[in-house]
Amino acid sequence: MFKKRLSILMAAMGVAFSLVACSGAKTADTKSADTSSEETKAVEETTKSEAKSESTDKKNVVVTTSFLQDMVEQLAGDTVNVELIIPAGEDPHLYVAKPEDYTKLSSADLTLYHGLHFEGKIVDALEAGGESVSRDFPKDRIGTMDEDGEIITDPHFWFDIDLYKMAVEAAGTSLENLNPEYKDKYEENKVKYLDELTKLDEYVKENISSIPKESRYLITPHDAFNYFSRAYDIEVKAPQGVSTESEVANQDIQETIDFIVEHKIKAIFAESTTDPARMEKLKEGAAAKGADVKIVSGEGNELFSDSLAPKGQDGDTYIDMYKHNVKLITENLK
């Protein structure tokens, strides 16, 4: 079964890489050389991964995002090797698979991904053999939005801590099936982590409720905070849709500017994975209408939406990321 799953993954990823290679403007000879180089690199990476696995006897768990990397580390500790596909700080909506990703997936004993079309450009390969942590979500809890006249799924479930807990439960089940000998350890870690998430939820509620109701408006570059909005009674608005691939129309920018002016919003927030220039347009538009609005941005002053911070930086775990966001929002809207 495992070999069959790997062959499916390899075939799917091979198609993805072929499409990427064909999209360039290189000559046929250059493409051939690049392909040869990529294949060689993939073989080398596979050999390294196999050697690593044999030397440690640990199972390889491949995850798509920094959120899931942290989740697996919280649950499994050092009992597995964890390999990340989309580096922290990169935009998963726009991420295109690389040859080394093919290598990681082909050597995985377990592949975990978000689901809900968050990893849009590599979703076919993931669905072929991976396990979605959102697989058990009740349909009525999954957000949808109208984007460019089409109803789409909102994948940013991690801003609803109750849904994140369900994802933790699903990941825990996958890990226990992978390593049944560590079941008791994983259960113990899961109970402890779920308790920490409950305390996080209480922290968020307390801090957000301290913002006066008339100031409880969150303006961000793209629509990543709707689960957060519903969970904590704070209205959110963004000029761009759920995906950072969606078009940013002048009308959407103008509507956001009008919203800022009408509600006398004093601060708007940049995100770590989006272009801060968009917020400058909102500030300039508001200024043209006599409103002074502050852009909360710069290193250490951006909201995390689609990624955690790189390892070693503030916000490099889910809990620290959430507290960072809440602190930033509270300090600038109170």
Image (cartoon, helix red, strand yellow):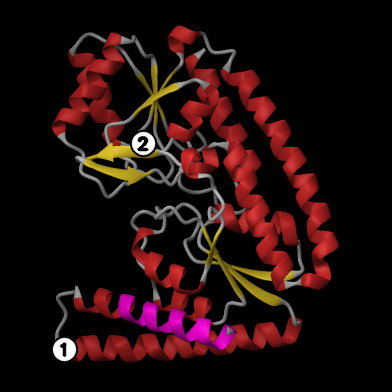
Measured as percent of width and height from the top left, residue 76 is found at: 74, 62
Residue that appears at 45% across and 68% down? 127
Which quarter of the figure has residue 295?
top left
Measured as percent of width and height from the top left, residue 130 is found at: 52, 69
Secondary element type, mark 1: helix
Locate residue 95 relative to residue 58 in the image: left or right: left
Measured as percent of width and height from the top left, residue 321 is found at: 58, 40
- Seen in the picture, residue 152 relative to 332 is either above or below; the reply is below
Residue 128: in magenta span: no
Whether residue 320 is visible = yes
Disc 2 marks which amino acid?
A: Asp
In the image, which residues are magenta?
Answer: 2-16
Measured as percent of width and height from the top left, residue 297 is found at: 42, 32
Residue that appears at 25% across and 46% down? 246
Which quarter of the figure has residue 264?
top left
- Seen in the picture, residue 163 relative to 57 is either above or below; the reply is above
- Circle 1 is placed at which residue position? 28
Nearer-the-camera pick, 332 or 1: 1
- Circle 2 is placed at which residue position? 223
Residue that appears at 84% across and 60% down? 185
Sequence-wise first label, 2 or 1: 1
